[in-house]
Image: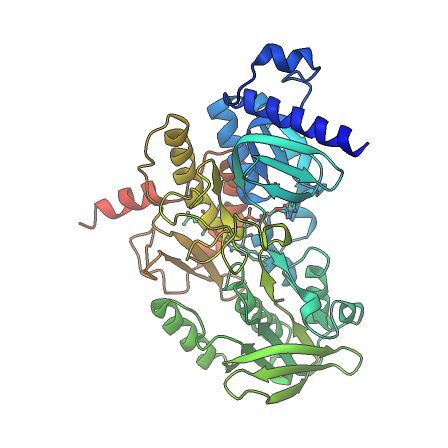
Amino acid sequence: MYCRHIAVSALRWQCAQWRHGRGAFGAAWCHARGCSGQSKEHYKVLVLGGGSGGITMSARMKRKVGAENVAVIEPSENHYYQPIWTLVGAGAKTVRSSGRPTASVVPSGVKWIKARVQEIDPDKNTVRTDNGKEISYQYLIVALGLQLHYEKIKGLPEGFEHPKIGSNYSVQTVEKTWKALQNFKEGNAIFSFPNTPVKCAGAPQKIMYLSDAYFRKTGKRSNANIIYNTSLPVLFGIKKYAESLWEIVKTRDLTVNLRHNLTEVRADKQEAVFEKLDSPGETVVFEYEMLHVTPPMGPPEVLKGNSLADQAGWLDLDKDTLQHKTYRNVFGIGDCTNLPTAKTAAAVAAQSSVLDRTISKVMKKDKPDKKYDGYTSCPLVTSYNTVILAEFDYNGQPLETFPIDQSKERRLMYHMKADLMPHLYWHGLLKGFWGGPGPYRKIMHLGMK
Ligand code: FAD
Ligand code: UQ1
């Protein structure tokens, strides 16, 4: 039985070599042994993860190599537009509006493999799924996103069964934020930021500004202590926008405690425990009437310890071309990568056009020539009708699309975030037509020069 297993594996491997145009045996050898190219699962381009980056690249790869040569592995029945959860948590949008069936976003003709990737073997060009399938590829695009770790906070996730606690970071908990806001009477409203990399680093404080606005609108503000406890030593990483945010914090009477990391939630007692990162061993307990949790985050489990990952577990990419540093037929996009920029859908958009070009070049055995500048963007929602549109690059330098000062709160930017962006996402980005605002930025700034 064991020997037969080895023999079958060897046969499959040999045939995979033939399909890759390598190996000692040819088509006739493989067909004679009942292993036709058609019956085996092999794709020219295999995409791991059907989130923002995975669906975007599936659409772009379909145009490049034909739908029948592309597959995407994604276990979830639904695809979510996560950026709108900030507004869902504040009651300005419905959670229903954030999701669509995965079947409707996978490009037509592209194979959707509804499974979870369990193992990647980049030396053999194969991937194994949780339902036991082995799939081989010629080119691999890794778009697995990141993992949320609520369980790393003592008392969670079970604490979410109590009221007064919510989190905009998952579809299961985002409506709890809105419930906690509505039920708020008086006391502390606390907002946390973890001691790990996060996606959309502005989101943990956006919900604080919206809560402040909601309390003012409903006459509860004078009963509320609004507290932002962040593990970071700064309010926001880019000075230009941080200055505006500090001004808002001051004028709206919000409290910011830097270097405070949430470690425990005692939901039955409505207490949150924070460690003071600059005084090792020291903790401080806050009572809360409302708690918004941004969970610790980390790389996908399947990448940790894999030869595709760096020491921390993130996909190890060339920061300019998005090609893997050692496996030249492997590429990546989005939150699962170690690209030294903020993890956002806006970054995915800009990365997608560079990666498209890189893959074209690699397929033609040319040298990749387009460079990703690290573009990322975070629409900092500061009320129910204003946004500061932060946009910046690898160097932390503002890289603004519009020829106006984007560090100011603007109504127009709110409408862009709430009304325009969802359309751009579903009909532009996911269809492979939106590669970020780079080309428009150049046009918009022409008149200024
Ligand atoms: P995802 O879109 O998360 O997709 C990863 C996919 O991989 C998922 O579908 C998952 O099911 C799948 N997957 C995971 N493990 C496996 C496995 N083992 N096998 C197969 N599939 C797997 N970005 C902005 O640009 N602007 C914003 O205003 C903004 N606001 C945000 C607010 C919130 C509250 C949140 C949560 C996010 C926000 N973002 C924002 C960030 C943005 O949503 C992400 O950066 C973006 O979705 C990243 O895309 P991705 O493809 O890397 O990951
Ligand atoms: C963007 O491209 C994008 O991806 C579709 C987002 O995610 C939802 C964004 O939030 C932003 C701000 C951008 C950048 C787009 C423009 C027009 C500045």
Residue 146 to residue 370: above or below: below
User: Residue drawn 72% across and 64% down?
Assistant: 176
Camera-nearest residue between 234 and 145: 145
Q: Give coordinates of residue 362: x percent, y percent.
A: 39, 31
Front-lying residue, 266 or 164: 266
Quadrant for the N terminus, please: top right
Quarter of the image holding residue 54? top right
| Location of residue 435 with respect to 251 vertically, above or below | above
- Relative to 244, is 202 on the left or the right? right
Q: Residue at x 73, y 70 (%)?
A: 156
Quarter of the rendering containing residue 349 = top left
The outermost residue toward the front is 3
Decide if residue 373 is in sight here: yes
Q: Which residue is painted at 62% across and 88% down in the image?
A: 284
Confirm whether residue 106 shows in the render. Answer: no
Q: Which residue is drawn at 66% across and 40% down?
A: 74
Is 99 above or below relative to 169? above
Q: Is residue 292 left or right of residue 419?
A: right
Tell me residue 122's x, y (percent). Answer: 55, 40
449 or 258, which is in the foreground? 258
- Can you say whether 280 is above or below 334 in the image? below
- The picture places residue 58, in percent across and down from the top left corner, at 54, 33
Q: Count the marks: how many?
A: 0
Residue 393 position, x and y percent, is 35, 56
